[in-house]
Amino acid sequence: MPSSVFESLFHPAQGTRLPEWDQVAESLHSLRVPAGQVVFAQGVEHPHVYAVRSGLLKLCYLNDEGDEWVKSFAHEGRFFASLAALPAGGRTHFMVEALEPSVLERLPYALLTDLADRHLAWARVLQALTLVFAARKEERERELLTLNPEQRYRAFRAAHPELEARIPQKDLARYLALTPVGLNRIVMRVRRSEGR
């Protein structure tokens, strides 16, 4: 049984234990994040990759006025990073805040790229995880560009039935590109149509 979320993410892609796994295990940092705490801010150097052992987090963009747009949520078994911050000198494009008390695992991205440079197995793992990330981004883009607000809400419920009750409605509205009032109307309409 995997001892970490990263181990379960990395090893299924390969099928066997990856080379120099002990080095990864030694570099893996576990942290507890209380609800409301920021994991990393927007606009800072932060070349790390995270996996969620337990809890729920929102990843969001802020503008100069402090307005917030939720780009995604991370929950158990998911991984996240700000891609813009991973290269040397890069900075995060968004912030991450815990919606629930969460336990995270963190790895330095430089370690993963070093291993990928030296081992084909690691390069394949990083490629597979990059494809997972890209597929999530493509699906999110498709929903925002092709679905109307009610369809976006229904798609979210279908894909993540366990998350709707855990996410504050204001954050779910920001994720679906709606106002809280607009989302509330949709929720009530959908419930009526389902006879609830």
Image: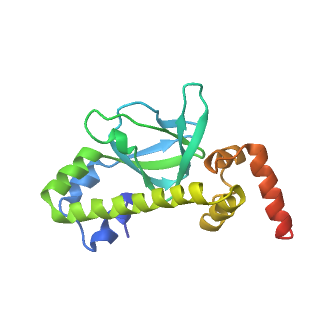
Residue at screen point 20% across, 66% down: 121
Residue 111, x across and y down, in percent: 23, 48
Q: Is residue 161 visible?
A: no
- Residue that extends furthest to the front in the rendered view of this protein: 146
Q: Quadrant of residue 170?
A: top right
Q: Is residue 72 left or right of residue 134?
A: right
Residue 19, x across and y down, in percent: 18, 63
Question: In this rendering, is residue 36 above or below 21?
Answer: above
* Coloring basis for residues: rainbow
Q: Judge by depth and name the residue closer to the eye, 47 or 103.
A: 47
Question: In this rendering, is residue 83 above or below 139?
Answer: above
Q: Judge by depth and name the residue closer to the eye, 43 or 26.
A: 43
Residue at screen point 60% across, 66% down: 159
Residue at screen point 54% across, 25% down: 64
Residue at screen point 57% across, 55% down: 145
Q: Quadrant of residue 35?
A: top right
User: In which quadrant will I find the N terminus?
Assistant: bottom left
Q: Is residue 183 left or right of residue 112?
A: right
Number of numbered tags placed on the structure image: 0
User: In which quadrant will I find the C terminus?
Assistant: bottom right
- Residue that extends furthest to the bottom in the rendered view of this protein: 15
- Residue that extends furthest to the top in the rendered view of this protein: 65
Q: Judge by depth and name the residue closer to the eye, 18 or 26.
A: 18
Residue 191, x across and y down, in percent: 82, 64
Question: In this rendering, is residue 157 above or below 35?
Answer: below
Residue 22, x across and y down, in percent: 22, 57
Q: Is residue 38 visible?
A: yes
